[in-house]
Image (cartoon, rainbow, N blue to C red):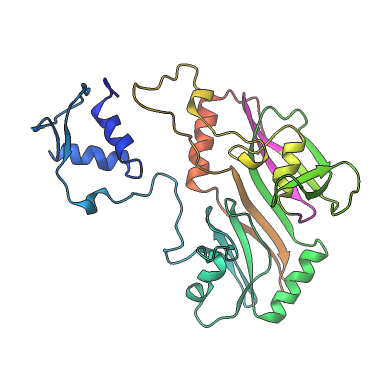
Amino acid sequence: MAGILLQDFLAVSYPSVDRAALRQLQGRGLVYVNGMRAEGPRRLSPFDYVELRVGQDELLPHRRRGEESSEGDAGPKVLWESAHALVVDKPAGITVVPDRSGENAGIHGLLPQLRPGEDLRVVHRLDRDTSGCLLLAKGVEAARHYDRQFRERLVEKRYVALVHGAVARPEFTVDAFVGPDPRRPGKMLTSPRAREDFRDARTDVLVEEAFSRHTLVCLSPKTGRSHQLRVHMQSQGHSIVGDADYGGEPLLLSQLKRTYKIRAGLSERALLERMFLHARDVAFCDVDGVHAEVHAPLPGDLQHALDKVASFGAMRTRRQ
């Protein structure tokens, strides 16, 4: 790493600490090179000796821009509530139900602290790395009502996703059977015709914004198959950004900015650390017959990534 800037060296050495926090340490005179206080920008030479004269608590991980709450926080934000249900804004990185290891209790494990003493029940699922609207029922009778709504396909769900490539048609429907991939346990495949263990699946696709190398789409699933949206978009040649399981690639600034050059000693970091898929809207009939429509704003990490794509990717069309 000879020739690397000191600020970059610190960022590489402490990747979980925010760059701004590391700059503040240097500004406070707590960073030394070869026994001398490091002031201002400087490049390091072979055998330079770098010291941070700080307590360990000053190097605790900082939440990066756009990162959401973790399971250790108070719980997911409540977007809507009635006497029979509530809709929460599920953060990315948390499962809905406990995982097989038992280490991640998921949203289910947070329910007692979200509404102490209430009988909250999960009535539908989102993938671990999908954020957005999650419906929870209050009690067994309400759970039966919403289960029936999902079975009869009366619940309307709309997701927003950033996909690779230019989607040619402004609006279309994907009809393809979805079933297990025998070569990859837990993953799915599509098929144009019925097969054993495959189930019919339908997704409506609407282009919202088009950029030079990516497209922002609204996905409306008419069925609720595992990984349906992800595998349906892969089948169209437009995998979701960051979805490595189904052909998605990381979102890199070097892909967007032609003049991008990385400084010596650094490796490029993706603009987004998960797939770009968000459950933006859900609409349903409540137990008392009232029609409910709930919206979850785009999380900070997805908005930040989208802003970068919009800044450097020439926009061709836009829908309001």
Q: Main secondary structure of the magenta part?
A: strand
Specify the farthest residue to the left: 36
**Residue 102 seen in this snapshot:** yes
Q: Is residue 205 left or right of residue 126?
A: right
Examine the image and state in which quarter residue 13 appears. Answer: top left
**Does the segment drawn in magenta span residue 208?**
yes
Task: Tally the marks.
Answer: 0
Between 77 and 224, the one nearer to me in the picture: 224
Q: Tell me if I can see residue 289 in this picture.
A: no
Quadrant into which the C terminus falls: top right
The x, y position of residue 61, in whole percent, is 33, 50
Quick check: is 198 in the magenta stretch?
no
Q: In the rendered image, which quarter is residue 48 located in? A: top left
96 displayed left or right of 184:
left
Picture coordinates of residue 139, whole percent (x, y): 65, 80
Please name the residue shown 48% across and 27% down the image: 253
Q: Does 117 sit above or below residue 218?
A: below
Tell me the residue at 41%/28% (across/down). Answer: 267
Q: Is residue 211 above or below residue 24?
A: above
| x and y percentages locating residue 275 in the rendered image | 58, 43
Horizontally, residue 295 falls left or right of residue 288, namely: left
The residue segment tinted magenta is: 207-225
Res 265 → quadrant: top left
